[in-house]
Structure formats: C-alpha cells, structure tokens
Image (cartoon, rainbow, N blue to C red):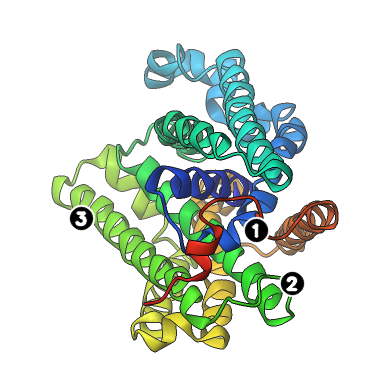
Amino acid sequence: MFLVSLGVGSVFLLALEYVAGADWSVPFRRIIEFTGFITPFLLILVIPLLFNLEELFKWAQPQIVAKDEILTGKSPYLNTEFFIIRVVVFIFIWSAFYFFISRNSLKQDSNGDQKLTRINIKLSAIFIPLFALTISFTSFDWMMSLEPHWFSTIFGVYFFSGTVIAALACATIFAIPLKEKGYLHSDLNNEHLFSFGALLFAFVNFWAYIAFSQYLLIWYADLPEETVWFLTRWQGSWAYFSILLIVIHFLVPYIILLSQPAKMDPKRLKFSAVWLLFAHLFDLFWLIMPSVKSMEHGYIFSWIDLVFPVAAVGIVIIIFTLKAKNNNLIPVGDPKLQKGLNFHL
C-alpha cells in the first residue's frame, strides 16, 4: 500500500496540475511523472499477494465464510475472483492514464505542441473521479477487509489524505536536492518551494480532520460492530502506537510547518517531507498490523518489518533514477513553463 500511495498518488498530483491549471508546479512536474512510473510495476509487485489471499483474508477462506452469516452476505463482493479482477482492472486504469499523460508531456519536449496540454487536461478530468473511486475501493479491499465484519464509510477518504501526503512528501524529497545541485532550472528559488510546504501543511490538517471525524462518529454511535476496530488498536502495545500516530502524523509536522518561512525553508521542508513519508508508513502499519491474528493483543517485532520499507525506498530510487537518466528533468516544451519559473508569492 505504501508503493500504491507513492505511485498512484503521484499520478493524481499530475492530473491535478493539469485540471487546476497550476503554474508553480510545472518546473517540478517531471519529478511526479517519474515517481508515477511506480504504478505499472504494481501489477508485478502484487502477484505474490494474490497467490496468498487465504493467508491474509478471512473472507478468502470458504470454511470460515460458510459458518459466518455476515461474510456470506458480503461474499458477492468479497470473493477471490472478483477481488483479483478489481485489483487488475484498477492497476490497468491507473497505468493507462499515467502512460498517456506522461507520454504527451514527454512528447511536448520535442515539438512544443500546445494541443498535447489540452489533451492531458481532458485525460486528467476523466482520471480524477476514477481515481477517487478506485483508490477508495483499493483501501476497502486491501486494508478494511482484513477485518471484514468492520466497516467505515470514511475509510477511503482517510487513505486518500495519507496517499496525497506521501506523494507530495516524495516529490519534495527529490525536488529540493535536485534544485540545490543545479539539475533543475536556474530561475527556481525558495519561493517556488512554498507550495510544497503549504500543500503538505494543508493535507496534514485534512488527514487529522478525517481521522478525528472517523473516531468521533464511531465513539458517538457506540455500536459494538464499529468500536471493535478501535478497541483492537487500544490493546497492549497498540495503545502506544495509537498515541504515537497522533504525535507523528499530526502534531510534529503541524508545528514544523506552521509558519510561512518554514514552508519555503529547504532544510525544514526536507526534514518535514522525510518525516511525513515515515508518518504515512507508520499509519499504514497501524491500520494493517493489529488485524494480523498473531498481533491482536500487541506488537511483536520481526526483522521483516524493517526489510519491506527499505525495499520500497530502494524500488522508488531505482525507478526514479532510470527515468531521470533517459528524460529531461524539466518539461521544456510546456507552454506554462516560463510562467511557472516567474512564480512569486
């Protein structure tokens, strides 16, 4: 799910720039185009999981479903065949839009055709509602269905907010060193970084709002079938994880990014971006791991918990480097590039 956030979140940011007509982000757009290239590889990375669905999900075990009235009622949606179809179709949709939008952007480097921008605006306008649906159902399928009796209608928005934070943080981590080492346009200055800081700050607050809304509604309704999810995350050592999540994902980045100068200070912005990327990883861990049977009553350390994040970071760096070696780091043919370079607060 971490790589889904980085890859598909980057495609969403790419589409958002075209639909919103943003200028400031044009000089940095190649960065999210390169990190968006993670998306097609999801089809390979997901294969081991698809062969182990019974190990991960109760609803994939026929003997459990047969004895469970709720799971039987949900089986038209939560069944192995339909699950695999959804996964493949969603990744295909994300990859197809990524391919066409990034191809048009790269093609514009050589011919400067403004028609390609108009085509990308139309593609992006189609992609954004599809993204909203597919990313929500992906969060339902891969995370919420780990506890198939539980449900939350706001869960998709919660994952969306974390996804955008992760994609923005990843873009910021690449953008600042590339700018400092002179790989990006020489006209870029620290004011260009302000929007990264402002967007990160906005989505940190949005994530906190959605997280609190989900908790408040479930606490107020006090229905056993809903409260059980939070009660699991308040058992044993998971209680410490729950408190730490508030500190890591909200309080620390909120304080660091609160002032306007902080939002364009490269050092503080780099630290915030790395911190928020870790915060999203911590959030996913908190969402997923208490649902694992062996960890229902508390966290049990395993070296594998360290291997997967390191492997994910390695995959992102390799993919970005491969793309950066073969393409311009600046969209030189984009008609809005000069306007983006002239951006001032």
Name the spot of residue 201 as percent of width and height, x first. Answer: 38, 71
Measured in 3D between alpha carbons, the distance from the residue under mark 3 to the one under mark 1, in whole angstroms, is 37 Å
Q: Amino acid under label 3?
A: Leu
Residue 299: tell me if it is visible.
no
Relative placement, left or right, of 139 versus 312 is left
Q: Amino acid at mark 2?
A: Tyr
Q: Can residue 65 be seen here?
A: yes
Nearer-the-camera pick, 144 or 315: 315
Residue 35, relative to residue 124: is it above or below? below
Amino acid bearing label 1: Ile
- List x then y, in percent, for residue 133: 41, 30
Label 3 with label 1: CB-CB less than 8 Å: no
Label 2 Cα crowd, 10 Å radius (few <14 / some 14-19 / many 20+): few
Q: Secondary structure at mark 2?
A: loop
**Image quarter of residue 45:** top right
The numbered dot on residue 216 is: 3
**To which quarter of the image does residue 174 belong?**
bottom right
| Viewer-side residue, 341 vs 32 | 341
Distance between mark 1 and mark 2 Cα atoms: 12 Å
Mark 1 or mark 2: name the one nearer the start of the chain.
1
Disc 3 secondary structure class = helix
Q: Give coordinates of residue 50: x percent, y percent.
A: 70, 28
Query: Looking at the image, is 184 positioned above or below residue 337?
Result: below
Mark whose residue sits in front, 3 or 2: 2
Q: Earlier in the sequence, mark 3 or mark 2?
A: 2
The residue where tag 2 is placed is 183
- Pointer 1: what residue? 31
Q: Residues within 10 Å of mark 1 (few under 14, many from 20)?
A: many
Q: Tell us which disc is closer to us: 1 or 2.
A: 2
